[in-house]
Image: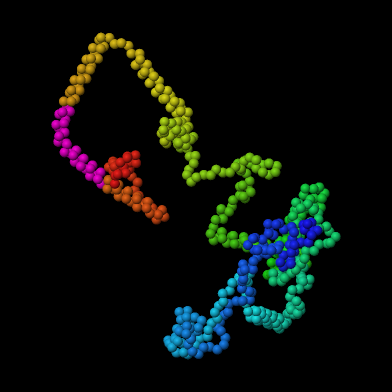
């Protein structure tokens, strides 16, 4: 009924109407509110939870309290100066020889006790809070009077010199400073950075506005601040309409617009340097002056160049053909589409390392390591497994293949010969027995000779014992060096990476047999189950 508007809306305890479209779960108050009628008080911010902030205008007080100063020392006051607002350790006055507690004279006035201010978001960021308005207005008036006094003195000097500009400045001084730019020079004429010029970019009201040419929001963008539409609003329409207006960029960069802009800038720079020149009133004078300045610049550049060449030399290096002839022809083939995009050619260069790449030596056509066979590296071009060997080409490949075939054929032949052995006759068997007997006799003679040599070598046993002692001594020294190097490695590993020394004077040489044996003895065997018990 209430939603349809046929019945009046409910009211709360303050007499305010409750919107009938509010949902029931929002309008219904919790049970602990003990509400007897409809209300929305539980949905509003509670007064006891509203945080109170310090009001604007309150600020910290500075200085000391005004009024009479204490004449007697008060209990709890500063023992040095006699102020009640601080203690002796917080006193900022010069320490007295005898404090005010004992003399009772020259009591210092009490300072203000600063209040605890708690501002809200805006109060914390108010830069003028606590500012004395009277002091600020007095400072502004003083600055204004000083500027007016300087203006008055400048006008008096101009009047005493008898310049005509003094009268014009008097007229300008009597008028309001924030005047409109009606009496100022036209746009594009005398340009002065210190002078405020306000000229509006007006258009004839009979002309159609640029933003009304095409009402499509996706067409050319119109900037209302500068009143410019840089692109063509009829870009995707008929050619007749496209010729009607092609955008501000076309007008800005077509014809003599660029040259006109450079002449205008030249006129402004000349006026700032004290030369009376005008683009619209004296175009011929401006053109002659600009040509003369360009000529002087060119002469100055050539003179500076000649003086440098006369002093340091090197003119022969400048006598080179022009860059157009040097860079006109190249060997690069690039194929473009009719839209200007690259179809073929002009690929990105490969990333090269700091090492030499694709360097072929000894007539090879491939690098070392391009061929692998039986656990060895070689050259792919000739299948050679010897580094820095001369390339033999295809013949080398054929030779390596023929060697493999020859080895296979020889093994097959030996197997066939063993299989095809014929039975021997009695004579051949007798001859073989006689050969074996002769071999046994020779072996006995060799054994007897060895016995004689052993007797002779008894004298040389002492020498061999000395050699063994020398080897044992060298092995002990190598073991000591290996232990010292391992301790040094452990110390370096404990250090930080940034504090480790760089051993640039380390001598790299092949290890001796004793050093290799010491390394094997000291090497930790992880696969040994008893290795963890070794100290």
Residue 340 appears in the figure: yes
Q: Please, is residue 239 above or below residue 285 in the view?
A: above
182 vs 20, nearest the viewer? 20
* Direction from residue 431 to residue 39 in the image, left or right: right
- Name the outermost residue toward the right: 206
Q: Please, is residue 362 above or below residue 11 in the view?
A: above
Where is residue 183? Give x, y as percent.
Answer: 78, 72
* Direction from residue 90 to residue 469 in the image, left or right: left
Magenta region, mostly helix, strand or loop?
helix
Q: Please, is residue 428 above or below residue 476 in the view?
A: above
291 vs 257, nearest the viewer? 257
Q: Which residue is drawn at 74% across and 67% down?
A: 15
Q: Which residue is drawn at 40% across and 20% down?
A: 409
Where is residue 109? Give x, y as percent.
Answer: 52, 85
Q: Please, is residue 510 above or below residue 162 in the view?
A: above
Q: Does the magenta stretch include residue 30?
A: no
Q: What stretch is highlighted in magenta?
A: 449-477
Q: Residue at x 20, y 18 (%)?
A: 438
- Name the outermost residue toward the top: 426
Q: Quadrant of the N terminus?
A: bottom right
Report the label total. 0
Colour basis: rainbow
26 vs 263, nearest the viewer? 26
Q: Quadrant of residue 302?
A: bottom right
Q: Is residue 451 magenta?
A: yes
Where is residue 200? Give x, y as percent.
Answer: 77, 66
* Direction from residue 533 to residue 380 in the image, left or right: right
* Direction from residue 460 to residue 142 in the image, left or right: right
Residue 389 appears in the figure: no
Q: Residue at x 85, y 60 (%)?
A: 206
Where is residue 44? Give x, y as percent.
Answer: 67, 64
């Amino acid at each position: 009924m209430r939603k349809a508007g046929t019945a009046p809306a409910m009211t709360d305890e303050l007499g305010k109407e409750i919107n009938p479209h509010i949902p029931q779960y929002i309008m219904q108050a919790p049970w602990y509110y003990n509400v007897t009628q409809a209300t929305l008080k539980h949905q509003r911010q509670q007064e006891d939870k509203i945080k109170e902030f310090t009001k604007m205008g309150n600020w910290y007080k500075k200085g000391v309290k005004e009024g009479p100063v204490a004449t007697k020392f008060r209990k709890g006051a500063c023992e040095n100066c006699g102020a009640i607002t601080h203690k002796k350790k917080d006193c900022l006055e010069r320490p007295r020889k005898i404090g005010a507690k004992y003399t009772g004279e020259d009591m210092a006035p009490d300072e203000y006790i600063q209040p605890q201010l708690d501002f809200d978001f805006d109060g914390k960021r108010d830069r003028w809070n606590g500012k004395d308005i009277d002091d600020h207005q007095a400072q502004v008036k003083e600055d204004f009077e000083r500027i007016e006094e300087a203006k008055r003195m400048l006008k008096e000097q101009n009047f005493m010199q008898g310049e005509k500009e003094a009268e014009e400045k008097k007229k300008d001084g009597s008028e309001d400073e924030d005047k409109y730019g009606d009496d100022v020079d036209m746009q594009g004429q005398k340009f002065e950075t210190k002078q405020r010029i306000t000229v509006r970019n007006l258009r004839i009201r009979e002309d159609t506005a640029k933003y009304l040419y095409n009402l499509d929001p996706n067409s050319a963008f119109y900037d209302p601040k500068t009143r410019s539409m840089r692109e063509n609003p009829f870009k995707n329409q008929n050619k007749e309409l496209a010729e009607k207006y092609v955008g501000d960029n076309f007008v800005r960069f077509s014809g003599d617009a660029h040259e006109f802009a450079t002449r205008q800038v030249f006129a402004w720079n000349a006026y700032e340097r004290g030369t009376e020149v005008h683009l619209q009133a004296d175009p011929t004078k401006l053109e002659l002056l600009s040509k003369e300045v360009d000529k002087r610049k060119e002469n100055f550049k050539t003179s500076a160049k000649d003086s440098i060449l006369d002093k340091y030399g090197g003119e022969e290096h400048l006598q080179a053909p022009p860059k157009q002839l040097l860079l006109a022809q190249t060997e690069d083939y690039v194929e473009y589409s009719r839209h200007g995009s690259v179809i073929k050619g002009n690929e990105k260069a490969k990333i090269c390392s700091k090492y030499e790449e694709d360097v072929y030596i000894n007539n090879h056509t491939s690098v070392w390591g391009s061929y692998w066979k039986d656990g060895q590296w070689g050259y792919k071009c000739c299948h050679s497994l010897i580094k820095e060997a001369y390339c033999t080409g295809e013949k080398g490949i054929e030779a390596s293949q023929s060697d493999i075939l020859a080895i296979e054929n020889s093994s097959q032949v030996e197997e066939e010969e063993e299989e095809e052995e014929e039975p021997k006759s009695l004579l051949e068997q007798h001859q073989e027995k006689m050969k074996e007997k002769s071999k046994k006799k020779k072996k006995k003679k060799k054994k007897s000779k060895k016995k004689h040599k052993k007797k002779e070598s008894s004298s040389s046993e002492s020498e061999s014992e000395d050699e063994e002692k020398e080897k044992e001594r060298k092995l002990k020294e190598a073991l000591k060096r290996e232990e010292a190097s391992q301790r040094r490695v452990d110390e370096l590993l404990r250090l930080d990476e940034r504090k480790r020394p760089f051993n640039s004077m380390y001598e790299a040489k092949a290890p001796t047999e004793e050093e290799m044996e010491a390394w094997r003895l000291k090497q930790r065997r992880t696969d040994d189950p008893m290795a963890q018990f070794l100290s």
